[in-house]
Image (cartoon, rainbow, N blue to C red):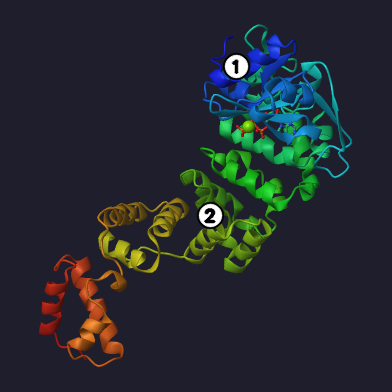
Amino acid sequence: MNIAIDPGAAAVLDRLHRAGHKAYLVGGCVRDSLSGRAPQDWDICTSARPEQTLALFGAAQCIPTGLRHGTVTVKQGGGLYEVTTFRTEEGYADGRHPDRVAFVAEVEADLARRDFTINAMAYNAAEGLVDPFGGAEDLLVRRVVRAVGDPARRFEEDGLRILRLYRFGAREQLALDAATAAAAVAARGRLGCVSAERIWQELSKLLAAPRPARWMPPEILQAILPELDMGCYAAALRAVDALPPDPLARLAALLAPSGPAAAAQALARLRCSNAEAAVVRALVAESGLALTGEAPRRQAWRLLARLDGGTACRLLALRQAQTGEAGFGAVAAAAGQLLAGHACCRTAQLAVDGRDLLALGLRPGPAVGRALAAALDEVVEERLPNERAGLLGWLRTQHWT
Ligand code: ATP
Ligand code: MG
């Protein structure tokens, strides 16, 4: 088995080997290479102590990322490579982080601290794959995510691993090893030890997987989102799978049955960014949107008159996923056309404004708004272009009361 190693990572490995240290690619990059996916980061583990790595590459080429935990980031050929000393971990008193790490000489001990067999493989060109826990077979043959060692203990040590289990399962479309899955559900109380930011980070990665519902057991989702209306959970999951892999629309699908107040509470607890929370709140608030029977184009511009383009498109996808009504798809297509053509959908986007109407002799008051709405209607229905001279001419011919 050969991995096409990123040139920068190969150069870092080579330098460590020449200095007499053991060094391997490890974790996600080995997993992704085996499953034929382009790795995002090329992480390296080594017998070299952090100070030896620093001395070997020199301060200018290194960022001392986490020396206490053994990590030095090495700059090489325009890329950044995390080089971490082989280590074991002990004593997870807080249910999330090790109390102590100890540097060790052999890669096998380092692989044993890792969460799942598919993440506990190392590789270098000379030795090939180092896979003491059967990660390659789990990934490629058995197609399961399985904890390294005793799953109950591994989830007790670090509650975040519970969410990582479902995230890797969903992303790689792997089944869950039965004992590992049972231990994850049993240990769900440990999710209380995980910070809100990390929960949202993991949940959004899970919601970005192709069809994640199979990897979203009710007990786990209820533990991280107590606001969920579990009576509607099965329907919400169907909507999640029917949606494109858009974490915010999918989170809205989960929270919509609970209503705006509970959704706002969940978003605050997850510490979503203001921008993310605004999108989800808007989707939940609008999730009663129904088709009207008007032409799709007209429904689309009504929506675009109230909502920004991104929210409108997400809302239409959400409603389509929730209801299965193809009509929402037609409105979405029309909205896409209007947006692509930078169509005028709001009175504020008209080439005329209130001052023009006052200049035409209208009295300040509701008549101005009605005239602008009527002008918008002419533009939206393509009876008039959105041009000042033509619109003024048309406005002059009308009677505004
Ligand atoms: P991704 O492509 O999502 O980055 P990854 O496998 O690289 O996937 P990281 O979170 O970057 O995941 O972690 C790198 C490696 O460190 C993992 O492959 C795993 O071996 C180990 N690891 C990360 N987090 C944990 C954890 N909470 N418990 C045990 N091992 C972990
Ligand atoms: Mg990674």
Residue ID at (15%, 74%): 391
Residue 60: x percent and y percent? 65, 29
- Would you place residue 254 above or below residue 352 in this image? above
Q: Name the amino acid, label 1.
A: Ala
Determine whether 253 is above or below 162 in the image.
below
User: Nearest the camera: 181 or 302?
Assistant: 302
Residue drawn at (77%, 21%), measured in percent from left and top?
Answer: 52
The amino acid marked with disc number 2 is Ala
Q: Is residue 24 left or right of residue 48?
A: left
The image shows residue 64 at horizontal and vertical percentages of: 72, 34
Q: Which mark is residue 253?
A: 2
Q: Which mark is residue 173?
A: none
**Neighbour tally class for label 1: few under 14, some 14-19, many 20 plus, Cα within 10 Å:** some
Q: Quadrant of the N terminus?
A: top right
- Asked which secondary structure carries label 2, the reply is helix
What is the quadrant of the C terminus in the image? bottom left
- In the displayed structure image, the side of residue 39 where residue 191 appears, left or right: right
**For residue 112, what is the image quadrant?**
top right
Question: Mark 1 highlights which residue?
Answer: 11
Residue 350 versus residue 143: which sits nearer the camera? 350
Label 1 SS = helix
> Looking at the image, is 274 positioned above or below residue 128?
below
Left or right: 145, with 69 as reference point: left
Res 163 seen here? yes
